[in-house]
Image (cartoon, rainbow, N blue to C red):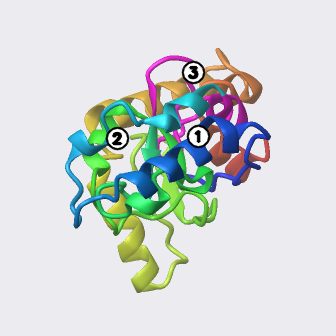
Amino acid sequence: MIRVARQMEPSDFETAVGSLGRLYLTNHPPPTPPVPSGYWNNHDYWTNCKDELMEAYDATCAYSGIRQRFGLQIDHYKDKSFHPYVAYDWANYRLCIGEINSTKRRRPDILDPFTVKDDWFDLDVWTGALSPAKHLDPGLAAQVKNTIVRLKLNSPSHNQIRRLWLEAFRAGHMDATAIRMVHAVVSAHLHRAWSV
């Protein structure tokens, strides 16, 4: 996981999402949390800004760093079932792959990609595994480890993907620019470790 710079709200966001969402919340106040998923049926106005999110965040999963044009979902960092009044706020949206979105769900103890620092997560260049950086104090290291575990960022598939890109780089099959186009976490590590 690396820091994701928060991007400005698009100029048409208020019309396409914000005002529609607030009107719905005003006219149909949400029930006491957790709000059932059916409450949002036909009122998932956040999908109106998916193209803008994809462009603003370079089609990159905020949690895994995987860049892809298809299959990314809109995650509500503060889960809409417990925080319905920020369901239509641009600042609450993070792009993520479906696997992570369903794993994250209602976990309030996941680190926010907007606030993490690039050097909080170490990447093992041989296994592809993530771990808390050694310089972190114990409390922050525990939060980083918790985020890795909860989001399954060290699943065999995630480790394999990172390991394959690292192997391609070491073998000279891909340069740092090409890796930057497919995996932000691996790219950030290469930049920190080898200044490439």
Q: Position of residue 132 (x, y in %)?
A: 44, 66
Image quarter where the C terminus lies is top right
Residue 68, compared with residue 84, is above or below; it is above
Q: Report the side of 22 relative to 52 (left or right).
A: left
Q: Residues within 10 Å of mark 2 (few under 14, many from 20)?
A: many
Residue for badge 3: 168
Instruction: Name the residue nearer the viewer: 193 or 92.
Output: 92
Question: How many angstroms separate mark 3 from mark 2 (CA)?
Answer: 25 Å
Instruction: Name the residue nearer the viewer: 192 or 6.
Output: 6
What is the secondary structure assignment of the residue under circle 2? helix
Q: Amino acid at mark 3?
A: Ala
Instruction: Identify the magenta region.
Output: 52-73
Q: Are marks 3 and 1 in contact (CB under 8 Å)?
A: no
What is the secondary structure assignment of the residue under circle 1? helix
Question: Which residue corresponds to the image point at 35% horizontal and 65% vertical from the top-left?
Answer: 145
Give whichever of discs 3 and 2 has the lower sequence position. 2
Q: Amino acid at mark 2?
A: Ile
Q: Amino acid at mark 1?
A: Val
